[in-house]
Image (cartoon, rainbow, N blue to C red):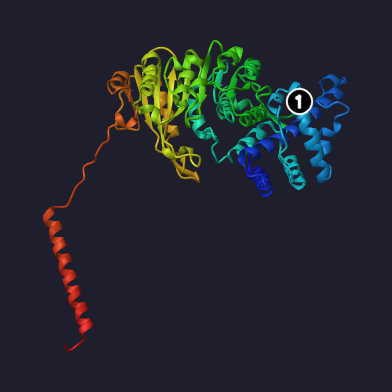
Amino acid sequence: MITGKLKSKIDQIWLDFHTGGITNPLTVIEQISYLMFARMLDLNEIKNEKRAVRLGKKLDKERVFNSNQQQLRWQNFKELPAQKMLELVRDEVFPFFRKEIISKTAIGEYLADAQLMIQKPSLLVLAVNRIEELPLTDRDTKGDLYEYLLSKLTTAGINGQFRSPRHIIRAMVEMIEPKPDERICDPACGTAGFLISTMEYLTEKYSTPSLIHIEKDEDGSEVKIFPGDKLEPYKSHIQKNLLTGFDFDVTMLRIAAMNLLLHGIDSPNIHYQDTLGNSFTDKWPKQATNGFDVILANPPFKGTIDEEDVHPTLKSKVHTKKTELLFLILMLRMLKTGGRCAVIVPDGVLFGGTNAHLGVRKNLIEDNQLEAVISLPPGVFKPYAGVSTAILIFTRGGKTDKIFFYDVKADGYSLDDKRHPVEQNDLPDLIKYWKEFKAKPDKPYKKSAKAFSVTAKEVIKNEYDLSLNKYQEVVHGEIKYRPPLEILADLAKLELDIQNGIKDLEQILVGPGV
């Protein structure tokens, strides 16, 4: 758990960058990520050196920094004067990232074009000193630190991507219930929020809290130990195959890789790829060819895509350039039969009247199992956007029988740009009713409630319209009015009071004795 003191340290780093002239949020996070990575490389090297001394072995083959590169280590350059530090980090450390780290660490491929954007020596010194104070050896804190850093992303990218609210992601993960032996994918992973939340969910669900205790790691940091951890048999699968992410924004990939690394995934399985593009089928990882078990995503739905770039198999299903529709077809294609998906879509997907919109909804309902439509309040994605959205949950294959609807009015935060915490929160209630629906799908629900179900036949009858207000019944309460004669009597009395008031005013203006 990140404390207020640690949040203040991140806030100060952020302020230092803005004061130093670097104001683009993505650039700030990217530069901080590079410096955090530089420190983590050195911390890992120190740990390996201590282990080698203890075991009486040589470390030459496992070294990241050879004997001629010791000046590139964090512990050495952090002590340099400002100008010399800037020159070394810019002219030697970053070229080292770009050329040699690629083959030495799992995250290396995301540093191929790493550039130091810090031009002021004083800013670099401040940033290095601030990052030196962060507890990057604490496995349970460093991930939370980075997530807090990512929470400062307050502007959407040019492709419509932005940081999805983590509490919305967590609700989606809890509804989809991923398992530790499955393969989970986000085809537009951004900062890897869905993948991180999946890992956190699995850790919490498959660990035994009563057995957890704290031990000291080799470097002196505190580590939670799970003696009864049911995830242990899946350790190799979790590190290599559990989580897969794709994105075509290199900056986002770097951030996602760092996020996964800080959350304990040593070899982040994320890839630079436009998943809607022509080349995706040939390039996606081998393990995906049989389909994923789970897809969790909030894909960008801003604008359209060049139709020539869309893979033919997607265009054969639906003729459109709208990314939100293409992503739905893509996800169905990426899932194995029986695979589950929870995805955020703009409201237009639910009721759009074009042939493409109708075709996608018909596909979901008649050729697959559409399970849930969850309406979200318009302010969920502020300050990025005020667009109305919904969550769709579906399974590839089968046929739709009943669809669960839920009307989320509040998510625990104000629905303005500030998004400060409030008491009203429908998400726990949503999860409760969803689990109830899954256990007893035939249970009757009142359509006037927040949670209710609708048969596929009824939706088909309404031309596949999935708008919640199409089916939710509005109950009008009886309003009691006062008797009309009583109201008229009050009006007459009021009129008399006004006339008397006017006469009194006239008397005052004319004066006494008139």
Q: Position of residue 348 (x, y in %)?
A: 39, 30
Q: Position of residue 126 (x, y in %)?
A: 74, 46
The residue furthest left is: 485
The total of numbered circles placed on residues is: 1
Q: Position of residue 244 (x, y in %)?
A: 59, 20
Please tell me how crowded label 1 is: few (under 14), some (14-19), or many (20+) other residues with Cα within 10 Å.
many
Q: Position of residue 461 (x, y in %)?
A: 27, 21
Which quarter of the rendering shows the C terminus? bottom left
The residue identified by callout 1 is: 101
Q: Which residue: 78% across, 37% down?
A: 90
Q: Is residue 208 above or below residue 367?
A: below
Horizontal side, residue 247 vs residue 340: left or right: right
Q: Which residue: 79% across, 29% down?
A: 96
Q: Amino acid at mark 1?
A: Ile
Res 43 seen here: no
The residue furthest bottom is: 513
